[in-house]
Image (cartoon, rainbow, N blue to C red):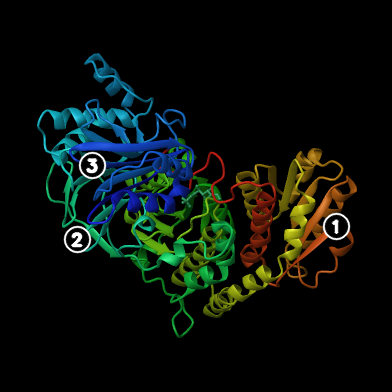
Amino acid sequence: MCGIIGYTGPRVARNVVVAGLRRMEYRGYDSAGVAVVSDGRIEYRKKAGKITNLDAELDDHPIPDTGLGIGHTRWATHGGPTDANAHPHLSAGGRVALIHNGIIENFAVLRTELEADGVTFASQTDTETAAQLLGREVEAGADLADAMRTVCGRLEGAFTLVAVDAAEPDRLVAARRNSPLVVGVGEGENFVASDVAAFIEFTRNAIELGQDQVVDVTPTSVTVTDFAGRPAPTHPFEVTWDLSAAEKSGYDWFMRKEIYEQPRAVADTLLGRFNPDGSLRLDELHIPEAELRSIDKIIIVACGTAYYAGLVAKYAIEHWTRIACEVEIASEFRYRDPIITGSTLVVTLSQSGETADTLMAIRHAREQRAKVIAICNTNGATIPRESDAVIYTHAGPEIGVASTKGFLTQVAACYLLGLYLAQVRGSMYDDEIHAVMSELAATPPLIQKVLDELDPIKELAKRFVDQKSVLFLGRHVGYPVALEGALKLKEIAYLHAEGFPAGELKHGPIALVEDGIPIFIVVPPQGRDQLHDKVVSNIQEVRARGALTVVLAEEGDAEVEPYADVLFRLPKVSTLLQPLVATVPLQMFACELATLKGYDVDQPRNLAKSVTVE
Ligand code: F6R
């Protein structure tokens, strides 16, 4: 949520900053702005709307070529998406410029105090409060880093702040609490950003800032302290993916590219997790086996698509481990006083590793002495850092706002965790575990097969382009797949869509069925699954009431044929693994429909990729 970047070095800062913003635009696109320090003054340009508007503004009103600059792409919280509310914000005398990601919860009190002192505000944002406070400290003679520490001491909430002082042509200072910030360490140049994608073009050497830290950056130095000014430990790491992973590589949308990357993403997530004897190994799971054996409850906590991945995981984990597994939406979790003990295992799923609700859930769980395992896609992000252990999904950067490969790799990682727990606890025989793992290892080519046969789904989108409502039905693990199919349509095609457990239909949702309404139905594997026939009955029930049925059923399932207006074949896999193949056509359907409607698939309205505020 909000992308921020700062640069100091020999390049033209404006160009570095705007290029970095373009790579982080998925984090928010309500407005964008840039500020540079030139001849003892701050020059800035900012515009509501996407970065193209800022580009036009910079063309009309160029900004000087200097080596120090900051930039911001915004997802609006306090104050609408206007030019005035766009970042950077300047202090009253124009001495400092500041950008911010997060929410300053006590901004109203601080603003009242400043206004009583005669400060006039130029925006409705919470951010400007920090800019004004910082400006006052610096005007009073404080060093920029000292001033930043003082201001941070007054702020409550979540914030990453980056500031420059008009009097210092090559220095920037940043601070972080509860929102992400990484430092890119170059040769004679340095960067700060919300995301490594912003500077990967220039350096792969990065430092993840810890909680409540301030970093003081010049072209040749990076100094990290805590909010009290004491030297603080840093966490250097190397970015392992390259620039092409953060680019569209010829696809029209990142989302489409990421859908097609799924066989590779799932394969990479499974890579290196098997021993030669077929047993599972999770090297990153530094929780003693004795502790894993004493777990009596698992709670999976996540948001949105990751929550649906958690719902899939529940079926597999309970089946394989016989441990009770709850799945909870992170924003609800800590407000309901959940029952957590020292023998509860909390598993969080988060692609970004920065989702504020999930992070708060972790903190709550750890306060209650639970062990926390993070399943995460972003190396060094806050959620894995604050967890007891982490299983990384190796999906590579996910830039399309709608999560696709994030979902599939989270599901795959949850399977690994479930099987590993079963191995440690002895709840499955070794040969049973090996059989599931072999099947899991064989799924990437099957996902590829689904991708190779997606043309009918793309055609279908043309037929449904004027639909007002679409329903999705599934049972067992097909139910979260239905929910995920509906979420994808809502978020990128702005279409009313609902996912239901097929068995629940008669308890209410069937009243929604009217002539011509498209209903997607995920059918469990035939023969091997007791629910298959029940779902076939559900298809008949909705078809009898005029629905247009789009049936996703495995190859060779002839029973569904008479009731399917459109039939899409899925490769044969066992029920628990079916989400890995069944979700893909639904993702592509949403992508195709949104494209046909002329919507911006990668940057759907009102959304942002990482939700770093509660
Ligand atoms: C939906 C989507 C969101 C995220 C959710 C959690 O396509 O992208 O629902 O899944 O905001 O995000 P992470 O996984 O980063 O915690």
Q: Look at the image and tell me in which quarter the N terminus lies.
A: top left
The answer to whether mark 2 is within 8 Å of ligand 1 is no
Q: Which residue is mark 3?
A: 37
Which residue is drawn at the image coordinates 19% and 40% (left, top)? 39
Which quadrant of the structure image shows residue 506?
top right
Which residue is drawn at the image coordinates 71% and 65% (left, top)? 454
State whether residue 249 appears in this view. yes
Which quadrant of the structure image shows residue 119?
top left
Q: Which residue is mark 2?
A: 188
Image height check: is 397 above or below 97?
Answer: below
Q: Farthest residue in the left direction?
A: 141
Q: Is residue 316 left or right of residue 76?
A: right
Front of the two marks 1 and 3: 3
Give whichever of discs 3 and 2 has the lower sequence position: 3
Q: Which residue is mark 1?
A: 565
Amino acid at the residue labelled 2: Gly
Q: Label 1 to label 2, Cα distance in Å?
A: 63 Å
Callout 1 secondary element:
loop
Q: Which mark is residue 380?
A: none
The answer to whether mark 1 is within 8 Å of ligand 1 is no
Residue 280 at x, y percent in the picture: 46, 75
Q: Are marks 1 and 2 in contact (CB under 8 Å)?
A: no
Amino acid at the residue labelled 3: Val
Q: Which of these two is toward me, 466 or 20?
A: 20
Image height check: is 568 above or below 143?
Answer: below
Amino acid at the residue labelled 1: Asp
Q: Which of these two is toward me, 397 or 197?
A: 197
Front of the two marks 3 and 2: 3
Which residue is drawn at the image coordinates 75% and 48% (left, top)? 465
Residue 134 at x, y percent in the picture: 21, 32
Q: Which of these two is toward me, 52 or 128?
A: 52
